[in-house]
Image (spheres, grey):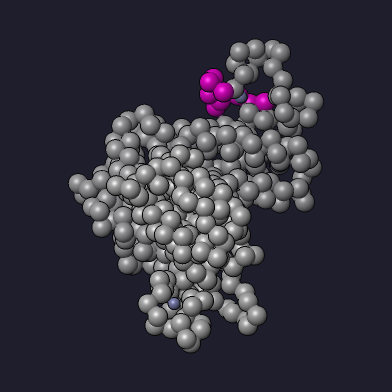
Amino acid sequence: MGPVQTVNFITALNLPTVSITTLKSREREIGKTLEEYAKWSGQKALEKEIALRKIPDTTANIAGNEETEVDGQDAIHVSFDGAWQKRGSGRCYNSLTGHATLLGETTGKCVNFGLKYGDCRKCDHVDEKGDGHDCRINHQGSAKSMESELAVQMVKDIQKTGCVVSNITMDADSTTIARLRKEVNAEIMKFSDRNHVRKKVSRDLIGLQEKHKISMNVVNYLTKDFSYALSQNKGNPENLRKVLKSIIPHAFGDHILCDKTWCQYHKNPDTYKHKSLPYGKNLTGEELRNELNKLFDIYASNSEKLSHLGSSQGNESLNNMIALKAPKAKHFGGSESLAFRVASGVAQKNEGRSYITEASNSKDK
Ligand SMILES: [Zn+2]
Ligand SMILES: [Zn+2]
C-alpha cells in the first residue's frame, strides 16, 4: 500500500483527509488499532477452531477417529508457513524481516501470526537511537533461524492458552520440527503438504519412463487417481490403503479390489472403458504392472501418515495477500509498517472485507 492507497484507506475509515506528510503518524495510529484487532480476531478464530473440532462430521473429524484432546486438554491441528522480506538499501544489508502465520485446520482461519525484525531503520540513524521510537527489533540470530523461531514462539503462545497443538502441517526444514519438539511439545507430529506428495508420486512415475513405455497421459492419470484417493480419505488410513492398492490393478483391468463407489466397471462390465487412459484401454505388461504395484504398495503401507496430510495452501494464499499489501520491492520490512500490513491481511482473511469498518469501530470503544 503506497501513499495514495493509504489515503483511500483512511478515507474508508471516515477519518479527516490528511496530507501525505502526516501520513506516517496517522498510519501508525491506525496500524496500532489494526494490530489489536488482528490479535483479537486470531483469539476468536482459535476458540472457534477448538469448538468446531469437537463436533463430529466436520471436515477434520470426518473419520471420527481424530483425537480432540490430549491428556484432557483441547488439541488442534494447524498449518504453518512463513515469508521473508529481504531489506535492501544503499548500503548492503543482509538482515531480514519475516512474518509467519498459523492456520487452524478445521476453520482455515488464522489463529496466530508473528513477525521478526532483524533491524530497524530508525536505529540505523545515530541521532534517532534511543528517541523512544516504536522499535520492533526482536531477532538477533541469523536470518535462517527466523522461521524456526517464529514457529516455536507461535505454537508456544497457543499452548499457553491451555490448548495443545498436536499436529503441524508445514514445508519447513527439519530444524523447525526439531526445535518445536525440544522446546514446546515433544509429541507434536509433522505432516507434510499434500501437494508435495502428489509431486513426488508424479516424479516416481516419470522415473519409470526410462525402463517402460508409459506416456505422460498415463503418468497424469495415475497421479490424479492418487491425489483423489488422498483427498477422499483424509483421516481414514484403512480405506486409503485399500484404494491405493486397487488403483494399479484397476488400470490393468482387474477390478476385484475396486470399491463400487468409485469404480464404474461394476455398473457395466461389458461396455466399460477407462475415461482417461489412451483409447479407454487397460494398461498392459506384466513387468510394468509389478513395478507400479511395488511403487503404490510403498505409499499404501504409509497410509496412516498420508491420510493425515494437511495442506499449507491457506497459509500461502494469506502470505500472498500480505505480499500484495507489503510489496517487497518497497522495503516496508524495516519499520513497523509491515506489522500493520500483516495485521490487515490477517483481519481480511478472518473477517472478510468488513474488517475495515469493524476495526475503526473498535477504536471508538
Ligand atoms: Zn529501532
Ligand atoms: Zn475398477
Which residue is situated farthest in the left direction here? 72
- The residue under the point 60% across, 16% down is 266
Residue 145, percent across and down?
A: 47, 72
Spot occupied by residue 267 in the image (x, y as percentages of width and height): 61, 13
Q: Which of 147/278 is in front?
A: 147
Instruction: Tell me residue 284's x, y (percent).
Output: 74, 33
| Foreground residue among 17 and 310 | 17
324 horizontally vs 163: left or right: right
Vertical position of residue 292 compared to residue 114: above or below: above
Between 228 and 206, the one lying in front of the other is 228
User: Where in the figure is residue 21, as x and y percent of width and height?
Assistant: 55, 65
**Residue segment shown in magenta:** 253-262
Residue placed farthest to the bottom in the image? 126
Q: Main secondary structure of the magenta part?
A: loop
- In the visual, does 93 lie left or right of 280? left
- For the point 76% across and 26% down, which residue is it? 281
Residue 21 visible to the viewer: yes
How many marks the image carries: the answer is: 0
In this rendering, is residue 301 above or below 90? above
Up the image or down, 128 lies above or below 233; here it is: below
- Location of the N terminus by quadrant is bottom right
Figure quarter occupied by ligand 2: top right
Look at 40% across and 71% down and name the residue there: 134
Residue 188 seen in this snapshot: no
Quadrant assignment, res 35: bottom left
On whether residue 96 falls in the magenta region, the answer is no
Residue at 71%, 13% in the rendered image = 271
